[in-house]
Image (spheres, helix red, strand yellow):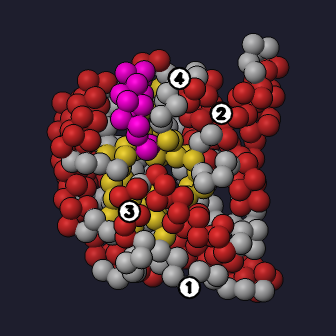
Amino acid sequence: MAFWTRRTFVSSTLAAAGTLSAAARGYAQRAGTGRTAVNANRIDVHQHLLPPEFVAALDKHGMSAWAPFSWSAEGAIAMMDEQQIATGILSLSTPGPNLGDDAEGRVLTKQVNERLADLVKAKPDRFGMFASVPLPDIDGSLEAIRHAYDDLGTDGVVLLTNTRGMYLGDPAFEPVMAELNRRKAVILIHPGPLPGPPIKGIHPSLADFCLDTTRAAISLVSNGVPRRYPQLRMILAHAGGFVPYAAYRISSLSNVINPNVDAQAMLEDLSSFYFDTALSGSPTVLPSLLPFAKPGHVLYGSDWPYSPNKTVGFFTGNLDAYKGLDSAGHAALNRKNGEALFPRLAKYTSAAKVTG
């Protein structure tokens, strides 16, 4: 599937960001404030990298549209300094390391995770890592989890919402979920393309990714994963897709479709996820997300570099201008909630500076 090209992605997104930046300025003026954080020291739980091994594998498989630009640690730090991000927890984005060949996927997974670990080792205050796993290869994924935790000291794991049409609540993934629960894993659940053809003229990032995240959340809850594995801390990307907005609909209609479903229990399980603010720091998303999520369960996210600097700035500016949070609420979302999930970063609180 031709997802995006460098030219269409960069030009269209920057053009949109230019318009949105004007809207952001207007919202800040209406709110009577600009950014409220003097030095936010944010922990960014949704930031990506494009390592050369991954780019080469995509090229080999004719999937280079998934890597529309180059990446560097220096570029990441420059963006982070601009947005007052102290630490970025890096992860591999869609389509993940398994591009169809399990043996090749295992090798690529190991290469990517070891590169991530090297970045963290070099700058442990600026970078963290979500290790990749080569699903749907179960044995390969279990070995990747062992290597990531026992040898590399990973901060967590990234899982795609669906793998070739199989969503995360599928019983086939039970061994992986059980092992991650044993590890008390922090998991970033990141969307992929819907298991079907895209709609002409509607880019998948506009709505499909949000739907895919929502599908994954329903799959996990409907199959009892959060209750069966209570040690999992699962972060839904992009404010959970449609979950906060549609949670009451989802739980109520699930009971209509299947009277054995406890609608209240399902609602509680949906609210038990963590949520990041990538592409979601807006005056329409935040009033739905913040009352729905449990205290401490909303985390800052940028989605850089797939969300370019200007777009990151727009959503971060709107987040900082949001008057529905007091200063303590902003501090929690920007950093304290992240420190609770990644305790190793707490020691950098007083020293955290937005410099390379």
Please, what secondary structure does the residue beneath circle 2 have? helix
* Vertical placement of residue 240 versus 89, above or below: above
Instruction: Say whether disc 1 or disc 2 marks the residue closer to the N-terminus.
Output: 1
Q: Position of residue 245 (x, y in %)?
A: 75, 47
Q: How far apart are labels 3 and 1 at the CA level? A: 20 Å
Q: How many neighbours does mark 2 have within 10 angstroms: few (below 14), some (14-19), or many (20 or more)? A: many
The answer to whether one can see residue 179 in this image is yes
Which quadrant is the C terminus positioned in? bottom left
| Amino acid type for the residue under numbered disc 2 | Asp
| Residue that label 2 marks | 269
Q: How many neighbours does mark 4 have within 10 angstroms: few (below 14), some (14-19), or many (20 or more)? A: few
Closer to us: 273 or 349 = 349
Check contact, mark 1 vs mark 2: CB within 8 A: no
* Vertical placement of residue 30 versus 131, above or below: below
Q: Residue at x 41, y 64 (%)?
A: 346
* Vertical placement of residue 254 versus 83, above or below: above
Q: Residue at x 26, y 24 (%)?
A: 139
| Mark linked to residue 228 | 4
| Residue that label 1 marks | 38
Please, what secondary structure does the residue beneath circle 3 have? helix
Q: Residue at x 43, y 44 (%)?
A: 186
Tell me where residue 19 sits by quadrant: bottom right
Q: How far apart are labels 1 and 2 at the CA level? A: 35 Å
Q: How many neighbours does mark 3 have within 10 angstroms: few (below 14), some (14-19), or many (20 or more)? A: many
In the image, the segment drawn in magenta is: 173-187
